[in-house]
Amino acid sequence: MEELIALLKDVRDDVDFENAKDLIDSKILTSFDIIQIISTLDDEYDISIPASDIVPENFNSAEAIYALVQKLQG
Amino acid sequence: MSLISFPFFIFMCCLLAAYYKAGEKHQWKILLIGSAFFYLCSNPLYIIFIIISIVSTWYLMRNPVRKNFMLTIAINLGLLIIFKYSVNLGVHDLIAPLGISFYTFMTLGYAHDCYDRKIKPSDNLWHYALFISYFPQLTQGPIGTYQDMQDQLTAYHPFDLQKIKTGAYRIIIGVFKKMVIAGRVAFYIDTVYSSPKGYGGLTLIVATLFYLVEMYADFSGYMDIVCGVSEMLGIRLKENFRRPYFSKSIPEYWRRWHISLNEWFNTHLFMPSVTTKWNKKVANILSRFFPKAKKGTLRLIVPTIIVWIITGVWHGAQASYLGWGIYFAFIMLVSFCTQSGVKKFNAKIHWNPENIFVKIFQVVRTLVFLSFGEIIYRSERFSDTIAIFKNIFTDTRINGAEIAAAMTPFGNGNQAAASMIIIVILVTAQFIVELMKEKDEKAFTGHRYIYAFAMLVVIALFGVAGKSNFMYQAF
Protein backbone atom coordinates (compact mmCIF):
# COMPACT_ATOMS: atom_id res chain seq x y z
CA MET A 1 0.00 0.00 0.00
CA GLU A 2 2.82 2.44 0.85
CA GLU A 3 4.45 1.68 -2.47
CA LEU A 4 1.17 2.44 -4.24
CA ILE A 5 0.77 5.76 -2.40
CA ALA A 6 4.31 6.70 -3.47
CA LEU A 7 3.44 5.91 -7.10
CA LEU A 8 0.25 7.96 -6.88
CA LYS A 9 2.20 10.87 -5.36
CA ASP A 10 4.46 10.74 -8.41
CA VAL A 11 1.42 11.54 -10.55
CA ARG A 12 -0.08 14.21 -8.26
CA ASP A 13 2.01 15.31 -5.30
CA ASP A 14 -0.65 17.80 -4.13
CA VAL A 15 -3.31 15.17 -3.35
CA ASP A 16 -3.83 13.53 0.06
CA PHE A 17 -4.01 9.94 -1.20
CA GLU A 18 -3.72 8.51 2.35
CA ASN A 19 -7.09 9.94 3.46
CA ALA A 20 -9.12 11.04 0.44
CA LYS A 21 -12.16 8.86 -0.30
CA ASP A 22 -13.77 10.86 -3.11
CA LEU A 23 -10.97 11.42 -5.60
CA ILE A 24 -13.32 11.13 -8.59
CA ASP A 25 -16.66 12.21 -7.12
CA SER A 26 -15.13 15.49 -5.87
CA LYS A 27 -13.25 15.95 -9.14
CA ILE A 28 -9.87 15.96 -7.36
CA LEU A 29 -8.43 13.72 -10.10
CA THR A 30 -8.98 14.63 -13.76
CA SER A 31 -9.27 12.12 -16.60
CA PHE A 32 -5.72 13.11 -17.52
CA ASP A 33 -4.53 12.05 -14.02
CA ILE A 34 -6.46 8.77 -14.28
CA ILE A 35 -4.64 7.90 -17.50
CA GLN A 36 -1.29 8.69 -15.85
CA ILE A 37 -2.25 6.42 -12.93
CA ILE A 38 -3.42 3.60 -15.21
CA SER A 39 -0.21 3.79 -17.18
CA THR A 40 1.95 3.75 -14.02
CA LEU A 41 0.04 0.80 -12.54
CA ASP A 42 0.25 -1.15 -15.83
CA ASP A 43 4.03 -0.75 -15.93
CA GLU A 44 4.83 -1.16 -12.22
CA TYR A 45 2.56 -4.13 -11.49
CA ASP A 46 2.64 -5.68 -14.96
CA ILE A 47 -1.13 -5.69 -15.27
CA SER A 48 -3.51 -4.50 -17.96
CA ILE A 49 -6.47 -2.43 -16.74
CA PRO A 50 -9.38 -2.84 -19.16
CA ALA A 51 -11.56 0.17 -20.05
CA SER A 52 -14.54 -1.53 -18.38
CA ASP A 53 -12.74 -1.26 -15.01
CA ILE A 54 -12.21 2.49 -15.40
CA VAL A 55 -15.22 3.49 -13.30
CA PRO A 56 -15.36 6.01 -10.38
CA GLU A 57 -15.74 3.24 -7.74
CA ASN A 58 -12.31 1.86 -8.63
CA PHE A 59 -10.49 5.20 -8.40
CA ASN A 60 -12.18 7.09 -5.55
CA SER A 61 -9.52 6.16 -2.97
CA ALA A 62 -6.08 4.60 -2.73
CA GLU A 63 -7.72 1.52 -1.12
CA ALA A 64 -10.05 1.10 -4.10
CA ILE A 65 -7.11 1.38 -6.53
CA TYR A 66 -5.18 -1.14 -4.41
CA ALA A 67 -8.14 -3.56 -4.50
CA LEU A 68 -8.33 -3.18 -8.30
CA VAL A 69 -4.62 -3.96 -8.69
CA GLN A 70 -4.97 -7.04 -6.45
CA LYS A 71 -8.01 -8.24 -8.41
CA LEU A 72 -6.15 -7.92 -11.73
CA GLN A 73 -3.00 -9.56 -10.35
CA GLY A 74 -5.01 -12.46 -8.93
CA MET B 1 -41.73 18.06 -38.54
CA SER B 2 -39.81 21.09 -37.29
CA LEU B 3 -39.91 21.71 -33.54
CA ILE B 4 -40.66 25.36 -34.23
CA SER B 5 -43.85 24.90 -36.21
CA PHE B 6 -47.60 24.91 -35.76
CA PRO B 7 -48.00 21.18 -36.59
CA PHE B 8 -45.52 20.34 -33.81
CA PHE B 9 -47.48 22.51 -31.36
CA ILE B 10 -50.69 20.60 -32.22
CA PHE B 11 -48.80 17.28 -31.99
CA MET B 12 -47.51 18.18 -28.49
CA CYS B 13 -50.98 19.25 -27.26
CA CYS B 14 -52.52 15.95 -28.42
CA LEU B 15 -49.62 13.92 -27.05
CA LEU B 16 -49.70 15.60 -23.62
CA ALA B 17 -53.48 15.07 -23.36
CA ALA B 18 -53.20 11.37 -24.28
CA TYR B 19 -50.08 10.85 -22.14
CA TYR B 20 -51.53 12.19 -18.91
CA LYS B 21 -54.92 10.59 -19.56
CA ALA B 22 -53.35 7.15 -20.03
CA GLY B 23 -53.12 4.90 -17.00
CA GLU B 24 -49.97 3.68 -15.27
CA LYS B 25 -49.55 0.67 -17.56
CA HIS B 26 -50.09 2.44 -20.84
CA GLN B 27 -48.28 5.77 -20.52
CA TRP B 28 -45.02 4.61 -22.10
CA LYS B 29 -46.97 3.09 -25.01
CA ILE B 30 -48.36 6.55 -25.80
CA LEU B 31 -44.76 7.81 -25.98
CA LEU B 32 -43.79 5.02 -28.36
CA ILE B 33 -46.81 5.66 -30.60
CA GLY B 34 -46.07 9.43 -30.47
CA SER B 35 -42.42 8.82 -31.41
CA ALA B 36 -43.40 6.57 -34.32
CA PHE B 37 -45.91 9.20 -35.51
CA PHE B 38 -43.22 11.93 -35.26
CA TYR B 39 -40.85 9.80 -37.35
CA LEU B 40 -43.52 8.98 -39.93
CA CYS B 41 -44.36 12.69 -40.30
CA SER B 42 -40.73 13.50 -41.03
CA ASN B 43 -39.36 10.59 -42.98
CA PRO B 44 -42.08 7.96 -43.65
CA LEU B 45 -40.25 5.44 -45.87
CA TYR B 46 -37.01 5.55 -43.96
CA ILE B 47 -38.61 4.31 -40.74
CA ILE B 48 -37.62 0.87 -42.03
CA PHE B 49 -33.94 1.59 -41.30
CA ILE B 50 -34.46 2.58 -37.68
CA ILE B 51 -36.64 -0.55 -37.31
CA ILE B 52 -33.83 -2.72 -38.75
CA SER B 53 -31.39 -1.14 -36.30
CA ILE B 54 -33.71 -1.55 -33.29
CA VAL B 55 -34.75 -5.15 -33.96
CA SER B 56 -31.30 -6.46 -34.96
CA THR B 57 -29.48 -4.77 -32.04
CA TRP B 58 -32.06 -5.83 -29.48
CA TYR B 59 -32.07 -9.43 -30.74
CA LEU B 60 -28.28 -9.80 -31.07
CA MET B 61 -27.42 -8.17 -27.76
CA ARG B 62 -29.80 -10.45 -25.86
CA ASN B 63 -26.75 -12.71 -25.99
CA PRO B 64 -23.88 -10.19 -25.70
CA VAL B 65 -21.01 -12.34 -26.94
CA ARG B 66 -18.19 -10.97 -29.10
CA LYS B 67 -19.60 -12.30 -32.40
CA ASN B 68 -22.99 -10.65 -31.81
CA PHE B 69 -21.36 -7.40 -30.68
CA MET B 70 -19.26 -7.25 -33.86
CA LEU B 71 -22.30 -8.01 -36.02
CA THR B 72 -24.26 -5.22 -34.30
CA ILE B 73 -21.43 -2.78 -35.00
CA ALA B 74 -21.25 -3.90 -38.65
CA ILE B 75 -25.01 -3.49 -39.26
CA ASN B 76 -25.34 -0.09 -37.58
CA LEU B 77 -22.08 1.45 -38.75
CA GLY B 78 -22.72 0.01 -42.22
CA LEU B 79 -26.09 1.79 -42.47
CA LEU B 80 -24.61 5.01 -41.11
CA ILE B 81 -21.72 4.98 -43.59
CA ILE B 82 -23.97 4.17 -46.55
CA PHE B 83 -26.36 7.02 -45.83
CA LYS B 84 -23.95 9.61 -44.52
CA TYR B 85 -21.22 9.20 -47.08
CA SER B 86 -23.33 8.16 -50.08
CA VAL B 87 -22.44 11.39 -51.88
CA ASN B 88 -18.74 10.55 -51.52
CA LEU B 89 -19.47 7.03 -52.76
CA GLY B 90 -20.99 8.47 -55.92
CA VAL B 91 -24.71 8.19 -55.02
CA HIS B 92 -26.29 11.62 -55.01
CA ASP B 93 -29.99 11.22 -54.33
CA LEU B 94 -29.89 9.26 -51.07
CA ILE B 95 -31.38 11.14 -48.11
CA ALA B 96 -30.15 10.05 -44.68
CA PRO B 97 -32.85 8.70 -42.35
CA LEU B 98 -33.86 11.20 -39.67
CA GLY B 99 -31.51 11.15 -36.67
CA ILE B 100 -29.34 8.29 -37.98
CA SER B 101 -26.08 9.79 -36.62
CA PHE B 102 -27.57 10.17 -33.16
CA TYR B 103 -29.54 6.92 -32.82
CA THR B 104 -26.59 4.94 -34.21
CA PHE B 105 -24.42 6.31 -31.37
CA MET B 106 -27.07 5.40 -28.79
CA THR B 107 -27.37 1.92 -30.30
CA LEU B 108 -23.60 1.34 -30.34
CA GLY B 109 -23.27 2.67 -26.77
CA TYR B 110 -26.01 0.26 -25.64
CA ALA B 111 -24.34 -2.67 -27.42
CA HIS B 112 -20.93 -1.85 -25.93
CA ASP B 113 -22.35 -1.55 -22.40
CA CYS B 114 -24.13 -4.91 -22.80
CA TYR B 115 -20.92 -6.50 -24.13
CA ASP B 116 -18.90 -5.06 -21.19
CA ARG B 117 -21.60 -6.36 -18.79
CA LYS B 118 -22.18 -2.83 -17.49
CA ILE B 119 -25.93 -3.22 -18.11
CA LYS B 120 -28.39 -6.09 -18.34
CA PRO B 121 -29.70 -6.39 -21.93
CA SER B 122 -33.27 -5.22 -22.38
CA ASP B 123 -35.77 -8.07 -22.24
CA ASN B 124 -38.57 -6.05 -23.84
CA LEU B 125 -38.24 -5.12 -27.50
CA TRP B 126 -40.86 -2.34 -27.22
CA HIS B 127 -39.11 -0.73 -24.23
CA TYR B 128 -35.84 -0.82 -26.16
CA ALA B 129 -37.58 0.65 -29.23
CA LEU B 130 -38.81 3.57 -27.12
CA PHE B 131 -35.28 4.18 -25.76
CA ILE B 132 -33.89 4.51 -29.30
CA SER B 133 -36.81 6.34 -30.92
CA TYR B 134 -37.91 8.71 -28.09
CA PHE B 135 -38.76 11.69 -30.28
CA PRO B 136 -37.28 14.67 -28.37
CA GLN B 137 -33.72 13.30 -28.50
CA LEU B 138 -33.98 11.49 -31.83
CA THR B 139 -33.10 14.27 -34.27
CA GLN B 140 -30.08 15.99 -32.70
CA GLY B 141 -29.49 14.28 -29.37
CA PRO B 142 -28.60 14.53 -26.56
CA ILE B 143 -27.16 11.05 -26.94
CA GLY B 144 -28.88 9.33 -24.02
CA THR B 145 -27.53 6.28 -22.25
CA TYR B 146 -29.69 3.25 -21.52
CA GLN B 147 -28.78 3.54 -17.81
CA ASP B 148 -30.13 7.12 -17.63
CA MET B 149 -33.17 6.73 -19.84
CA GLN B 150 -34.77 3.31 -19.54
CA ASP B 151 -36.34 3.58 -16.07
CA GLN B 152 -37.52 7.12 -16.74
CA LEU B 153 -39.14 6.20 -20.05
CA THR B 154 -41.10 3.25 -18.71
CA ALA B 155 -42.03 4.74 -15.30
CA TYR B 156 -45.42 6.34 -14.69
CA HIS B 157 -45.36 10.15 -14.56
CA PRO B 158 -48.46 11.74 -12.99
CA PHE B 159 -49.49 15.18 -14.22
CA ASP B 160 -47.41 17.94 -12.59
CA LEU B 161 -48.17 21.55 -13.48
CA GLN B 162 -44.77 22.70 -12.23
CA LYS B 163 -43.03 20.48 -14.81
CA ILE B 164 -45.23 21.86 -17.59
CA LYS B 165 -44.27 25.42 -16.55
CA THR B 166 -40.54 24.63 -16.27
CA GLY B 167 -40.67 22.89 -19.65
CA ALA B 168 -42.48 25.82 -21.27
CA TYR B 169 -39.85 28.23 -19.91
CA ARG B 170 -37.04 26.14 -21.40
CA ILE B 171 -38.87 26.01 -24.75
CA ILE B 172 -39.27 29.82 -24.82
CA ILE B 173 -35.54 30.29 -24.11
CA GLY B 174 -34.75 27.83 -26.91
CA VAL B 175 -37.03 29.51 -29.46
CA PHE B 176 -35.56 32.90 -28.51
CA LYS B 177 -31.98 31.68 -28.98
CA LYS B 178 -32.83 30.03 -32.29
CA MET B 179 -35.21 32.46 -33.95
CA VAL B 180 -33.98 35.78 -32.65
CA ILE B 181 -30.24 35.35 -32.05
CA ALA B 182 -29.13 32.50 -34.37
CA GLY B 183 -31.60 33.42 -37.12
CA ARG B 184 -30.45 37.05 -37.23
CA VAL B 185 -26.68 36.59 -37.08
CA ALA B 186 -26.87 33.76 -39.65
CA PHE B 187 -27.55 36.25 -42.48
CA TYR B 188 -24.37 38.18 -41.85
CA ILE B 189 -22.23 35.04 -41.51
CA ASP B 190 -23.70 33.46 -44.66
CA THR B 191 -23.04 36.60 -46.68
CA VAL B 192 -19.42 37.02 -45.55
CA TYR B 193 -18.46 33.32 -45.58
CA SER B 194 -19.99 32.63 -49.01
CA SER B 195 -17.23 34.77 -50.61
CA PRO B 196 -14.77 35.70 -47.85
CA LYS B 197 -11.83 36.59 -50.11
CA GLY B 198 -13.03 40.13 -50.75
CA TYR B 199 -13.60 41.09 -47.13
CA GLY B 200 -11.23 42.91 -44.81
CA GLY B 201 -9.86 41.51 -41.54
CA LEU B 202 -12.30 43.27 -39.23
CA THR B 203 -15.38 42.10 -41.15
CA LEU B 204 -14.04 38.52 -41.08
CA ILE B 205 -13.33 38.70 -37.35
CA VAL B 206 -16.87 39.96 -36.66
CA ALA B 207 -18.37 37.26 -38.90
CA THR B 208 -16.32 34.59 -37.08
CA LEU B 209 -17.36 35.86 -33.65
CA PHE B 210 -20.96 35.91 -34.87
CA TYR B 211 -20.50 32.33 -35.99
CA LEU B 212 -19.56 31.33 -32.43
CA VAL B 213 -22.75 33.07 -31.28
CA GLU B 214 -24.82 31.37 -33.98
CA MET B 215 -23.48 27.89 -33.23
CA TYR B 216 -24.17 28.21 -29.53
CA ALA B 217 -27.57 29.88 -29.92
CA ASP B 218 -28.67 27.38 -32.59
CA PHE B 219 -27.50 24.17 -30.98
CA SER B 220 -28.07 25.01 -27.30
CA GLY B 221 -31.39 26.62 -28.27
CA TYR B 222 -32.45 23.35 -29.85
CA MET B 223 -31.37 21.52 -26.70
CA ASP B 224 -33.43 23.91 -24.57
CA ILE B 225 -36.47 23.10 -26.71
CA VAL B 226 -36.03 19.30 -26.54
CA CYS B 227 -35.21 19.37 -22.80
CA GLY B 228 -38.31 21.54 -22.27
CA VAL B 229 -40.53 19.20 -24.33
CA SER B 230 -39.18 16.20 -22.42
CA GLU B 231 -39.56 17.97 -19.07
CA MET B 232 -43.27 18.42 -19.86
CA LEU B 233 -43.48 14.63 -20.17
CA GLY B 234 -41.72 14.26 -16.81
CA ILE B 235 -38.53 12.87 -18.41
CA ARG B 236 -35.22 14.58 -17.75
CA LEU B 237 -32.73 14.56 -20.63
CA LYS B 238 -29.00 14.91 -20.18
CA GLU B 239 -27.77 18.52 -20.38
CA ASN B 240 -25.63 18.94 -23.49
CA PHE B 241 -24.11 22.37 -22.72
CA ARG B 242 -22.69 23.98 -19.59
CA ARG B 243 -21.90 27.55 -20.67
CA PRO B 244 -18.99 26.39 -22.86
CA TYR B 245 -17.72 29.86 -23.81
CA PHE B 246 -16.66 30.48 -20.21
CA SER B 247 -14.13 27.62 -20.45
CA LYS B 248 -10.55 28.40 -19.46
CA SER B 249 -8.94 25.85 -21.78
CA ILE B 250 -9.83 23.89 -24.92
CA PRO B 251 -10.03 20.51 -23.06
CA GLU B 252 -12.43 22.17 -20.59
CA TYR B 253 -14.44 23.58 -23.52
CA TRP B 254 -14.92 20.08 -24.90
CA ARG B 255 -16.19 18.92 -21.52
CA ARG B 256 -18.83 21.68 -21.65
CA TRP B 257 -19.88 21.68 -25.35
CA HIS B 258 -21.98 18.84 -26.84
CA ILE B 259 -21.33 16.96 -23.59
CA SER B 260 -23.22 13.78 -24.50
CA LEU B 261 -21.25 13.28 -27.76
CA ASN B 262 -17.90 13.89 -26.06
CA GLU B 263 -18.76 11.58 -23.18
CA TRP B 264 -19.79 8.95 -25.72
CA PHE B 265 -16.42 9.21 -27.47
CA ASN B 266 -14.62 9.14 -24.13
CA THR B 267 -16.42 6.02 -22.88
CA HIS B 268 -16.71 4.00 -26.05
CA LEU B 269 -13.64 4.95 -28.07
CA PHE B 270 -11.03 7.00 -26.21
CA MET B 271 -10.71 5.03 -22.95
CA PRO B 272 -10.86 1.61 -24.68
CA SER B 273 -8.09 2.75 -27.10
CA VAL B 274 -5.95 4.14 -24.26
CA THR B 275 -5.99 0.77 -22.49
CA THR B 276 -5.32 -1.49 -25.47
CA LYS B 277 -2.10 -3.50 -25.77
CA TRP B 278 -1.18 -1.95 -29.12
CA ASN B 279 -1.42 1.52 -27.66
CA LYS B 280 0.87 0.45 -24.80
CA LYS B 281 3.36 -0.74 -27.43
CA VAL B 282 3.10 2.54 -29.34
CA ALA B 283 3.78 4.45 -26.08
CA ASN B 284 6.84 2.26 -25.44
CA ILE B 285 8.19 3.02 -28.93
CA LEU B 286 7.52 6.76 -28.51
CA SER B 287 9.30 6.78 -25.14
CA ARG B 288 12.54 5.96 -26.98
CA PHE B 289 12.21 9.26 -28.84
CA PHE B 290 10.89 11.23 -25.84
CA PRO B 291 12.67 9.67 -22.84
CA LYS B 292 11.66 12.48 -20.46
CA ALA B 293 7.91 12.28 -21.25
CA LYS B 294 5.57 10.44 -18.90
CA LYS B 295 4.32 7.11 -20.31
CA GLY B 296 0.74 8.07 -19.49
CA THR B 297 1.03 11.17 -21.67
CA LEU B 298 2.46 9.13 -24.55
CA ARG B 299 -0.50 6.77 -24.29
CA LEU B 300 -2.83 9.69 -25.00
CA ILE B 301 -1.35 10.56 -28.39
CA VAL B 302 -2.78 7.96 -30.79
CA PRO B 303 -6.26 7.74 -29.12
CA THR B 304 -6.56 11.55 -29.22
CA ILE B 305 -5.73 11.64 -32.93
CA ILE B 306 -8.17 8.78 -33.69
CA VAL B 307 -11.05 10.32 -31.70
CA TRP B 308 -10.64 13.78 -33.24
CA ILE B 309 -10.36 12.55 -36.80
CA ILE B 310 -13.51 10.46 -36.31
CA THR B 311 -15.31 13.39 -34.64
CA GLY B 312 -14.38 15.55 -37.63
CA VAL B 313 -15.48 13.02 -40.24
CA TRP B 314 -18.68 12.31 -38.26
CA HIS B 315 -19.75 15.85 -39.26
CA GLY B 316 -19.32 14.87 -42.92
CA ALA B 317 -16.72 13.58 -45.37
CA GLN B 318 -15.35 17.01 -46.27
CA ALA B 319 -11.78 18.24 -46.09
CA SER B 320 -12.82 21.15 -43.84
CA TYR B 321 -14.26 18.79 -41.20
CA LEU B 322 -11.16 16.59 -41.36
CA GLY B 323 -8.95 19.69 -41.01
CA TRP B 324 -11.04 20.82 -38.04
CA GLY B 325 -10.58 17.39 -36.37
CA ILE B 326 -6.82 17.43 -36.93
CA TYR B 327 -6.60 21.02 -35.61
CA PHE B 328 -8.35 20.12 -32.34
CA ALA B 329 -6.35 16.87 -31.99
CA PHE B 330 -3.22 19.03 -32.21
CA ILE B 331 -4.49 21.61 -29.67
CA MET B 332 -5.58 18.86 -27.26
CA LEU B 333 -2.21 17.11 -27.52
CA VAL B 334 -0.28 20.35 -26.96
CA SER B 335 -2.48 20.98 -23.93
CA PHE B 336 -1.92 17.45 -22.52
CA CYS B 337 1.83 17.43 -23.16
CA THR B 338 2.49 20.85 -21.66
CA GLN B 339 0.11 20.53 -18.68
CA SER B 340 2.61 19.68 -15.94
CA GLY B 341 5.29 22.06 -17.34
CA VAL B 342 2.81 24.96 -17.47
CA LYS B 343 1.68 24.23 -13.88
CA LYS B 344 5.29 24.38 -12.63
CA PHE B 345 5.96 27.55 -14.63
CA ASN B 346 2.80 29.23 -13.26
CA ALA B 347 3.84 28.39 -9.69
CA LYS B 348 7.28 29.86 -10.34
CA ILE B 349 5.92 33.21 -11.56
CA HIS B 350 3.24 33.23 -8.79
CA TRP B 351 0.44 33.21 -11.33
CA ASN B 352 -2.74 32.86 -9.27
CA PRO B 353 -5.39 30.87 -11.21
CA GLU B 354 -8.16 32.37 -9.04
CA ASN B 355 -7.29 35.95 -10.04
CA ILE B 356 -10.08 37.46 -12.16
CA PHE B 357 -7.67 38.88 -14.78
CA VAL B 358 -5.96 35.51 -15.13
CA LYS B 359 -9.38 33.89 -15.63
CA ILE B 360 -10.40 36.49 -18.25
CA PHE B 361 -7.09 35.97 -20.07
CA GLN B 362 -7.66 32.19 -20.11
CA VAL B 363 -11.24 32.53 -21.38
CA VAL B 364 -10.20 34.94 -24.17
CA ARG B 365 -7.27 32.69 -25.15
CA THR B 366 -9.66 29.71 -25.37
CA LEU B 367 -12.07 31.70 -27.55
CA VAL B 368 -9.23 32.71 -29.90
CA PHE B 369 -8.09 29.08 -30.38
CA LEU B 370 -11.69 28.03 -30.77
CA SER B 371 -12.32 30.70 -33.42
CA PHE B 372 -9.35 29.45 -35.47
CA GLY B 373 -10.88 25.97 -35.43
CA GLU B 374 -14.29 27.27 -36.42
CA ILE B 375 -12.81 29.24 -39.36
CA ILE B 376 -11.50 25.90 -40.70
CA TYR B 377 -14.88 24.28 -40.04
CA ARG B 378 -17.07 26.98 -41.55
CA SER B 379 -15.03 27.71 -44.70
CA GLU B 380 -16.56 26.29 -47.84
CA ARG B 381 -13.19 25.76 -49.57
CA PHE B 382 -9.62 25.30 -48.37
CA SER B 383 -8.56 28.37 -50.35
CA ASP B 384 -11.18 30.35 -48.36
CA THR B 385 -9.63 29.20 -45.08
CA ILE B 386 -6.22 30.43 -46.20
CA ALA B 387 -7.66 33.73 -47.43
CA ILE B 388 -9.57 34.34 -44.17
CA PHE B 389 -6.47 33.76 -42.01
CA LYS B 390 -4.38 35.92 -44.34
CA ASN B 391 -6.87 38.80 -44.35
CA ILE B 392 -7.42 38.68 -40.58
CA PHE B 393 -3.72 39.11 -39.90
CA THR B 394 -2.77 41.42 -42.76
CA ASP B 395 -5.80 43.45 -43.84
CA THR B 396 -6.68 45.72 -40.92
CA ARG B 397 -8.57 48.42 -42.84
CA ILE B 398 -12.06 49.34 -41.66
CA ASN B 399 -14.27 49.47 -44.69
CA GLY B 400 -17.66 51.11 -44.07
CA ALA B 401 -19.08 50.12 -47.45
CA GLU B 402 -18.14 46.51 -46.86
CA ILE B 403 -19.85 46.42 -43.46
CA ALA B 404 -22.95 48.04 -44.94
CA ALA B 405 -22.95 45.52 -47.81
CA ALA B 406 -22.75 42.59 -45.41
CA MET B 407 -25.68 43.98 -43.47
CA THR B 408 -28.06 44.36 -46.43
CA PRO B 409 -30.13 41.32 -45.37
CA PHE B 410 -31.07 43.33 -42.26
CA GLY B 411 -32.54 46.12 -44.37
CA ASN B 412 -31.12 49.44 -45.51
CA GLY B 413 -29.41 52.28 -43.68
CA ASN B 414 -31.04 53.02 -40.34
CA GLN B 415 -33.05 49.83 -40.37
CA ALA B 416 -29.88 47.73 -40.66
CA ALA B 417 -28.18 49.74 -37.92
CA ALA B 418 -31.21 49.30 -35.66
CA SER B 419 -31.15 45.52 -36.26
CA MET B 420 -27.49 45.43 -35.28
CA ILE B 421 -28.16 47.35 -32.08
CA ILE B 422 -30.99 44.97 -31.20
CA ILE B 423 -28.73 41.96 -31.76
CA VAL B 424 -26.02 43.42 -29.56
CA ILE B 425 -28.56 44.15 -26.77
CA LEU B 426 -30.06 40.65 -26.99
CA VAL B 427 -26.71 38.88 -27.03
CA THR B 428 -25.57 41.02 -24.08
CA ALA B 429 -28.78 40.21 -22.14
CA GLN B 430 -28.28 36.49 -22.73
CA PHE B 431 -24.60 36.83 -21.82
CA ILE B 432 -25.46 38.48 -18.48
CA VAL B 433 -27.94 35.70 -17.66
CA GLU B 434 -25.33 33.05 -18.44
CA LEU B 435 -22.64 34.90 -16.49
CA MET B 436 -24.92 35.01 -13.44
CA LYS B 437 -25.53 31.28 -13.80
CA GLU B 438 -21.80 30.60 -14.17
CA LYS B 439 -21.30 32.11 -10.71
CA ASP B 440 -24.34 30.43 -9.19
CA GLU B 441 -26.38 27.76 -10.99
CA LYS B 442 -29.62 28.84 -9.29
CA ALA B 443 -29.03 32.58 -9.64
CA PHE B 444 -31.69 33.37 -12.19
CA THR B 445 -34.72 31.35 -11.09
CA GLY B 446 -36.46 34.27 -9.33
CA HIS B 447 -36.89 36.50 -12.37
CA ARG B 448 -37.28 33.92 -15.04
CA TYR B 449 -40.99 34.38 -15.77
CA ILE B 450 -40.52 38.11 -16.40
CA TYR B 451 -37.56 37.22 -18.62
CA ALA B 452 -39.61 34.58 -20.43
CA PHE B 453 -42.39 37.07 -21.09
CA ALA B 454 -39.89 39.66 -22.39
CA MET B 455 -38.42 37.03 -24.69
CA LEU B 456 -41.86 36.06 -26.01
CA VAL B 457 -42.43 39.69 -26.99
CA VAL B 458 -39.01 39.84 -28.67
CA ILE B 459 -39.66 36.55 -30.54
CA ALA B 460 -42.95 37.94 -31.82
CA LEU B 461 -41.29 41.17 -32.97
CA PHE B 462 -37.95 40.01 -34.30
CA GLY B 463 -38.09 36.23 -34.82
CA VAL B 464 -36.90 35.00 -38.19
CA ALA B 465 -39.69 32.73 -39.36
CA GLY B 466 -38.04 31.67 -42.60
CA LYS B 467 -34.98 29.96 -41.18
CA SER B 468 -36.17 27.27 -38.80
CA ASN B 469 -33.79 24.46 -39.80
CA PHE B 470 -31.30 23.64 -37.08
CA MET B 471 -27.63 23.33 -37.94
CA TYR B 472 -27.10 19.95 -36.30
CA GLN B 473 -30.09 18.42 -38.09
CA ALA B 474 -27.71 17.99 -41.02
CA PHE B 475 -25.61 15.52 -39.05
Image (cartoon, rainbow, N blue to C red):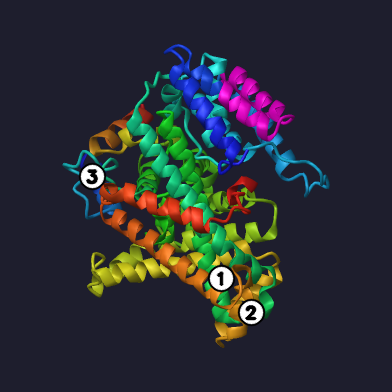
Residue A5 marker:
3
Identify the residue at image location x=23%, y=64%: B354
- Asked whether the beta carbons under mark 1 and mark 2 sit within 8 Å of each other, the answer is yes
| SS assignment at label 2 | loop
Measuring from the top left, give residue B174's x and y in whole percent. 47, 48
Q: CA distance from mark 1 to mark 2?
A: 10 Å
Residue range (magenta): B33-62
CB atoms of marks 3 and 2 within 8 Å: no
**Amino acid carrying mark 3 in the image:** Ile
| Residue B280 - label | none
Q: Which residue is mark 1?
A: B207
Residue A24 x/y as whole percent:
29, 42
**Frontmost residue, B276 versus B388:** B388
Q: Are marks 1 and 3 in contact (CB under 8 Å)?
A: no
SS under mark 3: helix
Residue B381 image-quadrant placement:
bottom right
Residue at 42% across / 53% down in the picture? B455
Left or right: B13 with respect to B95?
left
Residue B416 in picture, x, y percent from top left: 56, 73
Q: Using the image, name the chain to which the residue with label 3 belongs.
A: A
Was residue B228 drawn as part of the magenta stretch in this picture?
no
State whether discs 3 and 2 lie on one chain.
no
Q: Give the number of the mark in front: 1 or 3.
A: 1
Q: What amino acid is at disc 2?
A: Tyr
Which residue is label 2 attached to? B199
Tell me if A44 is positioned left or right of B121 in this view.
left
The picture quadrant where one finds residue B386 is bottom right
Q: Chain of mark 1?
A: B
Real-space Cα separation, disc 1 to disc 3, in angstroms: 52 Å
Residue B23: x and y in percent read 43, 12
